[in-house]
Image: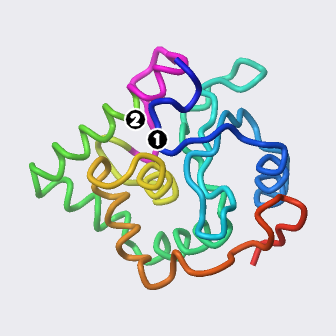
């Protein structure tokens, strides 16, 4: 399987992409395989990462949100108590819980297609709770709508704030000062 082939729109990371991601994160990216989604100005917004780091340690976060603007917006939503509310809805709504279980299974299948980790742990609290909106937003941006119900919800909540304009400077990675 080619890296990112199961992710619609994923593209091989260029040197410029790697430089842009390093500037976004403030460090060199670990395990970067491809760019899974881009912001409107063309910068990497989500990267697909290797299930194992170079030292062999597992890294279960397959889709990593790198866009500084989106990261900040997701963090703001997290401080609002939204994750607790989402988890409560999981407990009360069997249809939502089933959709979230399917998102978890899809996430595991995509990760295991690259390299099986031998674990049922995915990311973001799936499938029983919601603990990281960044993960769900990254998953939604990478695979599209209708896969992760909480990723869809987070993106809907950010519709007025993103996508909007040039979030980080030139898309060639030469100058990507975070907002």
* Circle 1: element type: loop
Which mark is in front, 2 or 1? 2
Q: Residue furthest bottom?
A: 160
Q: Position of residue 166 (x, y in %)?
A: 68, 77
Quarter where residue 174 is shown: bottom right
What is the number of the mark on residue 107? 2
Magenta stretch contains residue 81: no
Residue 83 placement, left or right of 162: left
Q: Position of residue 122 (x, y in %)?
A: 44, 34
* Circle 2: element type: helix
In this figure, which residue is indicated by the disc labeled 1? 123
Q: Please provide the residue range marked out in magenta.
A: 109-125
Quarter where residue 89 is shown: bottom left
**Residue neighbourhood size for the residue with mark 2, other residues' Cα within 10 Å, grouped as few (<14), some (14–19), many (≥20):** many
Magenta stretch contains residue 119: yes
Q: Position of residue 129 (x, y in %)?
A: 33, 49
Magenta span: chief secondary structure: loop
Residue at the spot 83% in from the left edge and 72% down from the top edge: 177
**Residue neighbourhood size for the residue with mark 1, other residues' Cα within 10 Å, grouped as few (<14), some (14–19), many (≥20):** many
Above or below: residue 142 compared with residue 121: below
């Amino acid at each position: 399987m080619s890296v990112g082939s199961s992710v619609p729109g994923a593209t091989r990371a260029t040197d410029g992409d790697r430089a842009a991601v390093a500037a976004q994160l403030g460090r060199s990216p670990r395990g970067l395989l491809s760019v899974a989604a881009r912001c409107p100005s063309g910068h990497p917004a989500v990267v697909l990462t290797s299930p194992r780091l170079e030292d062999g340690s597992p890294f279960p976060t397959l889709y990593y949100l790198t866009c500084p603007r989106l990261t900040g917006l997701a963090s703001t939503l997290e401080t609002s108590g939204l994750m607790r509310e989402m988890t409560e809805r999981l407990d009360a709504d069997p249809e939502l819980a089933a959709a979230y279980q399917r998102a978890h299974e899809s996430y595991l299948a995509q990760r295991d297609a690259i390299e099986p980790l031998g674990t049922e742990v995915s990311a973001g609290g799936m499938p029983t709770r919601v603990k990281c909106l960044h993960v769900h937003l990254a998953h939604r941006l990478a695979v599209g709508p209708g896969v992760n119900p909480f990723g869809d919800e987070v993106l809907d909540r950010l519709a007025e704030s993103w996508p909007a304009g040039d979030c980080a400077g030139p898309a060639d990675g030469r100058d990507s000062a975070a907002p």
